[in-house]
Image (cartoon, rainbow, N blue to C red):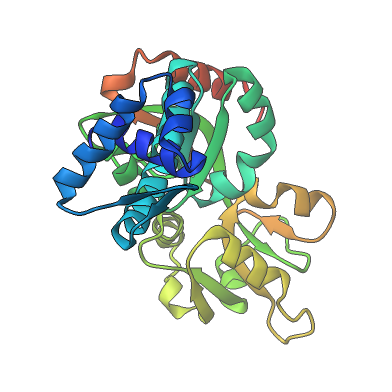
Amino acid sequence: MLKDFAKLHTFMVVVKEKSFSKASAKLGISQPAVTQQIKFIEEYLDTKIVERKKNGIKLTKEGEDLHKIAQRLEKAITSSERDLLKIINKEFTFVIGASNAIGNYVLPQHIPKLKDAIQNDIYVKVENSELIISLLEDKQIDLALIESPIFRDNIIYREWVEDELVIFSNKQLPRSLTAKDLKSFQWYCRDEQSHTKKLMSEAFDEIGVDCRSFDVLGVLSGTTAVKEAVIRADQNSEKQVVSVISTHAISEDVKNGTLFCAPLKNKTVKRKFYIAYSKDRKHDAFIENVVNFLFQLKV
């Protein structure tokens, strides 16, 4: 019954025109055909839905209920038809999954140009790298931009942009930081699952510093949370407040003097951002266009 929406459409027109004859003219079919379709619905439902009156028609209680259902179906069909037209006309939203530093600080300024380049709407979903790759595998996103390589066999990974992790503060820092400097600070640390935490812990170990000995104010998840915490730190406190972040996330703040950053002495902590997409879409024109655009960016 619900699969045969033509008869329900006839019912909708009868209700709208309040007449079988007017519905017949509107639909371009005979009045007996209209009557037959309404009768089919009534037989299917085993109940009366329309009563004919001298001045038109009146719906029964069951007819009113059916009309509400038919209205919902009509809206759903109209919406689905619009979606089908988008596919036919190659109009859809290209979904990019991006990890925190990329999605919040690298990509946003380039979205308008990317939208023009592929002539489609862009949606960016920001999550941690592991979840982004899971979404890519589940085909919930079209392409991933990640800070740490979560390798899976069915995914293509391409090195994209180089990133450097630095220590930053809302107060001036030395040009480079020694082990003694690190122990003099108060810290906002990254959560244990963070790729940033892993890389910096390895770097601290290499210079003989145990980060477990740091004076820790709190553990935060995500680039934005860390950045905002340090920006709002009390500049008059006895110990200077610091944390670790991607240079891409604070480049503008460093330029305008809101934040200050420094590397470890005789040690740089660099990593690559990656572009990732499904192997079964490696010849997809939209994927190729987006990838080509990203490689041409000056980040």
Is residue 259 shown to the viewer in this render? yes
Single out the residue that lies furthest toward the bottom. Answer: 238
> Residue 183's spot in the image, x, y percent?
56, 76
The quarter holding residue 103 reads: top right
The quadrant of the rendering that contains the N terminus is top left
Please tell me which residue is depicted at 40% across the width and 44% down the height of the picture.
Answer: 148
Is residue 156 shown to the viewer in this render? no
User: Toward the viewer: 284 or 45?
Assistant: 45
Q: Is residue 217 left or right of residue 146?
A: right
The quarter holding residue 61 reads: bottom left
> Residue 79's spot in the image, x, y percent?
45, 37
Single out the residue that lies furthest toward the right. Answer: 256
Please tell me which residue is depicted at 50% across the width and 32% down the height of the picture.
Answer: 93
Please tell me which residue is depicted at 51% across the width and 23% down the height of the picture.
Answer: 91
User: Toward the viewer: 109 or 44?
Assistant: 44
Q: Is residue 40 left or right of residue 79?
A: left
User: Toward the viewer: 293 or 208?
Assistant: 293
* Count of residue discs: 0
Q: Is residue 58 left or right of residue 218?
A: left
The quarter holding residue 233 reads: bottom right
Give above or below for 128 relative to 228. above
Q: Is residue 247 left or right of residue 42?
A: right
User: Toward the viewer: 246 or 153?
Assistant: 153
> Residue 122's spot in the image, x, y percent?
56, 34
The quadrant of the rendering that contains the C terminus is top right
Please tell me which residue is depicted at 73% across the width and 62% down the height of the picture.
Answer: 174
> Residue 20's spot in the image, x, y percent?
41, 35
Give above or below for 133 relative to 211. above
Give above or below for 189 relative to 245. below
